[in-house]
Amino acid sequence: MKIYRNIEEIERVNNAVVTTGTFDGVHLGHQAVFDVMKAEAAKVGGETVVVTFFPHPRYVLGLDVDSLKFITTMERKISLMEKAGIDHLFIIEFTKEFSRNSSEAFVTNYIINPFHPKKIIIGHDHHFGRNRHGSYELLLNLGAEYGFDVIQVAPLKINGVTVSSTRVRNLLEKGSIAEANKLLGYEYSIKGMVVHGNGIGRTIGYPTANIKVGNEYKLIAANGVYACRVEYNGQLHGGMTNIGFRPTINQSSLTIEVNIFDFNKDIYDETITIYFVDRLRNEVKFNNLSALKTQLAKDKKKAQEIL
């Protein structure tokens, strides 16, 4: 996949089939749009193009910034789009100046002029441009003028529920990991650097890697204990992760700590990725460390069964 961060970098794209959006989560609904793009590109011997934005428009415009959390970082988003088989990715730097582009100016200057699209594909509820005034109808009018077709993809529903980034976020915030993963089409993950904790886990036989997440806008799933897989140095290991405040030892700040099964390496200051599989239980305050150790043994057994 070729990645462009300004118009001057863009190479000639043959019979471009284009979509645009923020694509938080790159969930199954987004992937359905990509599947249509790839099918349409195959018909005309074309290439697929995704036009997206960074930073997120809401962040730049100061809209609900306090509650602004995303399922995927840009790094993860790029990886998922490449895995989905997208040929070209154009990441526009979203600024307040850029936000003043009308919907028509955005399509003309950032899609039509650089890519000369054969087709533009959009999701069922997609709006774009200044004040989100851009619509399917606007694209149809521009398509008639500039000679491209427009296809609107129907919503993807699973068990009667439309797949959306908002739906996935709500599930993650409740800790419904397994259900969220079904809508994502992959396992929700957190990537971070291993930092020093207080070492209590090691004293009771369950050493943990404490994770510092570098992106403050990364959505962290609900507090609780989870069965997970941990990627370190290209290999996957089973594990269990606790997200929360460790009430048994009166921890005051949120921590993410993972016990990696059958693993005994010093990985401080290294990066790992935790893939969440299912939620085991709520975070609980135990009377003492002995009671915590007993519960952790049960958690480990259950996690291993799930994994």
Image (spheres, grey):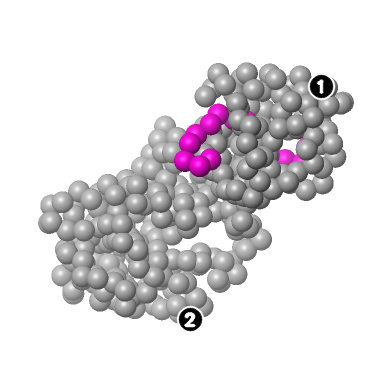
What crowding class fits label 2: few (fewer than 14 Cα within 10 Å), some (14-19), or many (20 or more)? few
Residue 170 percent coordinates (x, y): 57, 44
Percent x, y of residue 160: 41, 35
Q: Would you place residue 123 above or below residue 116 in this image?
A: above
Q: Quadrant of residue 200?
A: top right
Q: Residue at x 44, y 66 (%)?
A: 53
- Locate residue 107, reporting x and y percent: 31, 72
The picture quadrant where one finds residue 291 is top right
* Residue 130 sits inside the magenta stretch: no
Q: How many callouts does the rendering have?
A: 2
The image shows residue 231, relative to residue 3, as above or below, that is above
**Going 39% across and 70% down the picture, which residue do you hit?**
5
Q: Which residue is mark 2?
A: 97
Residue type, mark 2 in image: Glu
| SS at mark 1 in the image | helix
Residue beneath the point at 21% across and 66% down = 13
Question: Residue, x 62% and y 63% (percent of image)?
Answer: 65
Q: CA distance from mark 2 to mark 1?
A: 57 Å
Query: Of helix, strand and loop, which mostly describes the magenta segment?
Result: strand
Identify the amino acid type marked 1: Ala
Q: Is residue 20 shown left or right of residue 227?
A: left
Q: Can you see residue 251? A: yes
Q: Position of residue 290 (x, y in %)?
A: 83, 22
Q: Element type at marker 2?
A: helix
Label at residue 291 = 1
The reply to whether residue 133 is in sight is: no
Q: Nearer the viewer, residue 140 or 181?
A: 181
Q: Quadrant of residue 244?
A: top right
Residues in magenta, as a range: 232-246
| Mark 1 Cα-neighbour bin, 10 Å: few <14, some 14–19, many ≥20 | few
